[in-house]
Structures are given as C-alpha cells and as structure tokens.
Amino acid sequence: MERRTFLSLMGLGWLATSFPMVVAAFLDKQQPKTAAPSDFKPVGTVSQLESNGQISLKQFFGPEPILVVREPKTAKVIAVNPTCTHRGCLINWKAQEEVFDCPCHHSQFSVNGQVLRGPADDPLQTYTVEVQGQQVLVKQPTL
C-alpha cells in the first residue's frame, strides 16, 4: 500500500469516527430543556392548585410537610413548611386575609413566611417554586 493511500484512508477513518460526536453535540444544543432540574420535585399541578386553593403534602424531601398556595394579589405561587415555629402545629392558609394562621396559639405569618403576630418568633421555612407547563415544582432545600 502506498503512503498516500494509507494517509488518505487514515484521514477518512478519523472523519468517520468524529462525525457522530459532532452530530450529537449539535443535536444536544437544538433540543429544548423541558425536564425539571434534579433539585426540583413536582408537588402537584396548576389545576389542583386552582381547584383546591392549595397543595398540601404530609411529606416533602423527607418527613417535613409542605403547603403550596397562590398569593391572591400577584398570583405568585408560594411554598412553605406549614409547621408553626412556636409549638409545631400545622398552620392554615387564609386567602382572604393573605396570612398563614396557626390554630393552636394564633401566630400569624405573611405570604413570605415572616412573623406578623406571635407567640412565634421565627419565620416559616420557604421554598423556591417554579411552574413548568402544568407542573408545580418546588426546589429541594439545601441542608
């Protein structure tokens, strides 16, 4: 085999083996990213939120509960740990008043979890929320 033929075949072989990687890299950039990031977890759908006024789960990323509501004025979706920071009772969302209310000792919290009225001193834990299509996704808290 001549040197020129050998080098031509080697070059052609190199191009043939590189072509699938080039195509894969191009197609990866063309595909829209619709999957939820790994640190987000679906908690329900927008239609569930609209029909029930809230999404409540007894366990979220472990033993902690979660409460997802929509703020009436801005329609922003909010997620909190509904455990009162005073004595651990589960709080309720009062949409007309736009507050989270503890039925045990009547602590109240704002839509962003801040204490409005004691005896609770600490705010509620809040979570980052994303809505993708009909899915309501909540970001896993960092430990």
Image (cartoon, rainbow, N blue to C red):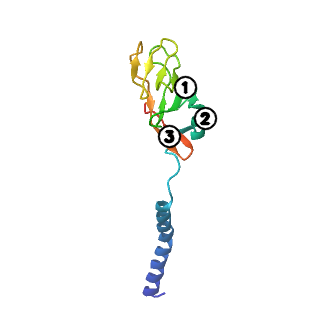
Q: Quadrant of the C terminus?
A: top left
Image position, residue 90 (x, y; %): 53, 19
| Mark seen at residue 51 | 2
On screen, residue 47 versus residue 76, left or right, reads right
> What secondary structure is found at the residue carrying circle 3?
strand
* Residue drawn at point x = 51 percent, y = 24 percent: 94
In primary-sequence order, the first of circles 3 and 2 is 3
> What secondary structure is found at the residue carrying circle 2?
helix
Q: How busy is the neighbourhood of tag 2: few (under 14 within 10 Å), some, or many (20 plus)?
A: few
On screen, residue 119 versus residue 51, left or right, reads left
In primary-sequence order, the first of circles 1 and 2 is 2
Q: Nearer the viewer, residue 137 or 12?
A: 137
In primary-sequence order, the first of circles 3 and 1 is 3
Q: Amino acid at mark 1?
A: Pro
Image position, residue 41 (x, y; %): 53, 39
Where 36 falls versus 114 (above or below)?
A: below
Q: Amino acid at mark 3?
A: Phe
Between disc 3 and disc 2, the foreground one is: 2
Where 65 falls versus 89 (above or below)?
A: below
Image position, residue 125 (x, y; %): 44, 26
- According to the picture, the residue beneath numbered tag 1 turns out to be 63
Image position, residue 67 (x, y; %): 53, 28
Give me the C-alpha separation between circle 3 and circle 1.
17 Å
- According to the picture, the residue beneath numbered tag 3 turns out to be 40
Q: Amino acid at mark 2?
A: Ser
> What secondary structure is found at the residue carrying circle 1?
loop
Give me the C-alpha separation between circle 1 and circle 2.
26 Å
Would you say the residues marked 3 and 2 are in contact, meaning their CB atoms lie under 8 Å apart? Answer: no
